[in-house]
Amino acid sequence: MVTEIANENSAYRSALRELTKVSGEPSWLRALRGRSFDQFEGVGFPGVEQEEWKYTNVAPIMRTKFTPVVNSNGTALSKRNGLAPFIYEETRDSAFVFVNGIFREDLSSCKGLSGVVALDLNDALQISEYETVIRESLERNANSDNNGFELLNIALFAGGLFISIPRGLNLRTPIQLQFVSEPVKAGAPAAVFPRVLIVGKKNSAATIIESYRATAEGIYLTNAIVDLVLDEGARVQHYKVQRESAGASHIAKTRADLGRNAGYDTTTINFGAALSRHDINVTMDHEGASCSVDGLYMVDGSQHTDTHSVIDHRQPHCTSRQLYKGILDGKSRAVFNGKVFVRHGAQQTDAQQTNKNLLLSSEAQIDTKPQLEIYADDVKCTHGAAVGQLDDDELFYLESRGINPSLAKNMLTYGFAEEVIERIKIESIKRELDEAVLNRLHTSL
Amino acid sequence: MLEIRNLHASVDGNEILKGINLKVNKGEVHAIMGPNGSGKSTLAKVLAGHPSYEVTGGEVIYYGQNLLEMSPDERAREGVFMAFQYPVEVPGVSNAQFLRLAYNEKQKHLGQEELDPLEFKDYLKEKAKLVEMDASFMTRSVNEGFSGGEKKRNEILQMAVLDPKLSVLDETDSGLDIDALRIVAEGVNKLHDPEKAVIVVTHYQRLLNYIVPDFVHVLSAGRIVKEGGKELALELEERGYDWLKNGNAKNTAAPAAS
């Protein structure tokens, strides 16, 4: 048994060895990678016996012999060849492209981003000012609570990206982080470890689009971590669009730390992957911060999607809003676990959380657990979850106008998704998602 | 156009309609009046095919076809329209998308030309004038956040777009102020022509000042207990419904309206 585990992890270990050979990496990072990997070997991938992973079994990931991608050798993707459809109209001059998790400056364009610092993590580490920030972020988030996926990401990320929005800059052009998966030459399923750190300096404002796509259907693992650190008064609008290949596993963590009066609004769309798990943690450890943490998951067939969110009110006068909606068809399964913590002394907290699920098939299954923990007494908090089918009165209303029952059903399902999609402020994302929803429903409007 | 013969219907096992007979020819406007609980809204919903109402007897013939065997959407495509007493909100679906889809479903069914979004926009703009509805209502979700009056106007807008042969207005006057009532009624009148028929279901005579019926039928306890011309409505306004109850109606001669 022990030797078997050792064998299963041997590809990860040799990837680590290769990474530590990369010249120029600071010694603290090498040490951190090593420590994290040892820890990973100790704890392994999370199992269903753990409360946070109770409904999501990652055994298929554990069983698959993935080859970690540590460099960009052997990729074929080019601007002329397959990349263009993934880039949004609004981000033609502001798209950072990652192929199999590795940042590719040659495929990226940042003409539209003057004033913004955007560097390959390895390059940013050579500049002491940035090295300090990166180190702080990496070390702060490498602790004993980390699960196997986070540990593996710390150990094996390669070619990440560092973005810093300078003080006071109100960036009108949205930034796209496009993660593209491409079959690796060897033919073995790839494991990729994207890593991004975004810093919003005081009173800056920016929009980030984080998008995951594949050039071909296939089996691979994305294990991503995106950290956001927002200083006082900084604002970030963050869209995450996960449309991975149908055979993929997508494990991702988004972490946002909000400074005083900072604002973080995010919408996560989970449509793709056979197995997806998104952990989103927003920490408000300074007064006056606010966030909205919205999302939509739409799954069918045997897809499994899991969202675990933590919104942590640690200081007074912070506001959070959360609307997560889910549409499940076929034998799909979804998990929503939304924790809202209101810590001691976090008075005047204003928190609202809603999770609504639409089950289109009797075989689909949702496990939803909104969880509000309040340790302060002067707060305004509401939460709720709903699971249901389409409304009979709405169906009859549409049918009474001549719309056949199956089209009526699809229109209402589309309408259900729209409540999340219509809040998105970038037209091409909205269009893309409208189309994706309608395609999924085999409907056109 | 429409013939209702000895129609019985129940909801949750309670018989509401106990033998309705009614004949509607094209060009005619019929008013169905009656006290609360008399079954007039049930009649409207049965005609539209609402699934909560079970037809337990009788038949409804619409242009030679058995209407009761048609699904609600088929009825609509064949030209039957019901304006809802309580129009339903449909979040996330814009009024324009909804109306175009409904319109094109009907056009497809009739083998007529469908309209693309741009063409439909022009068509819709014309129709919206009828009920004095602003263009902003077209991009909003169906009925979501509409006031009571706006919802009713939206019903008549749908009627205008779908151009039905038989329109059943279920208490369209309820909850309307006098201006909205006038707009709604004028819309209905402008849409009326000798090829179409309208059934107005209402508790009050008020709406019938604007939409003048050719025939008035009074329902009580699931049966039509009195029939007459438009003057019957005025009489009901004056005398209330009580004198028609307890089976007295058939024996009471209606005095001529002044």
Image (cartoon, rainbow, N blue to C red):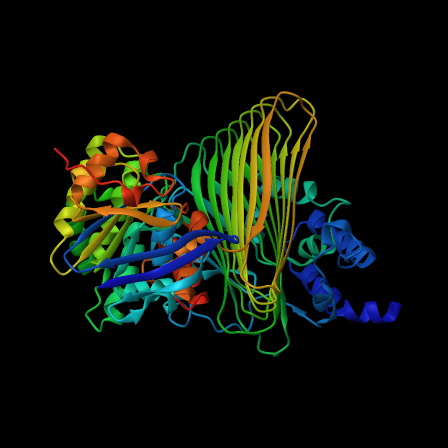
Q: Nearer the viewer, residue A102 or A8?
A: A8
In the rendered image, which quarter is residue A40 located in? bottom right
Up the image or down, B138 lies above or below A103; here it is above
> Residue B39 placed where, x, y %?
38, 47
Would residue A163 appear left or right of B85 to someone viewing this image? right
Please state the horizontal and vertical placement of residue A419, each as a whole percent of the image: 44, 47
User: Up-down: is A129 above or below A196?
Assistant: above
* Left or right of residue B251, residue A322 in this image: right
Point out the residue furthest to the front here. Answer: B251
Q: Nearer the viewer, residue A182 or A239?
A: A239
**Residue A296 visible in the snapshot:** yes
> In screen coordinates, is A104 left or right of B101?
right
Residue at image position (14%, 57%) is: B27
User: Of A402 and B28, which appears nearest the observer?
Assistant: B28
Question: Does residue A109 appear anywhere in the picture?
Answer: no
* Quadrant assignment for the N terminus of chain A: bottom right
Name the residue nearer the viewer: B151 or A324.
B151
Q: Quadrant of residue A56?
A: bottom right
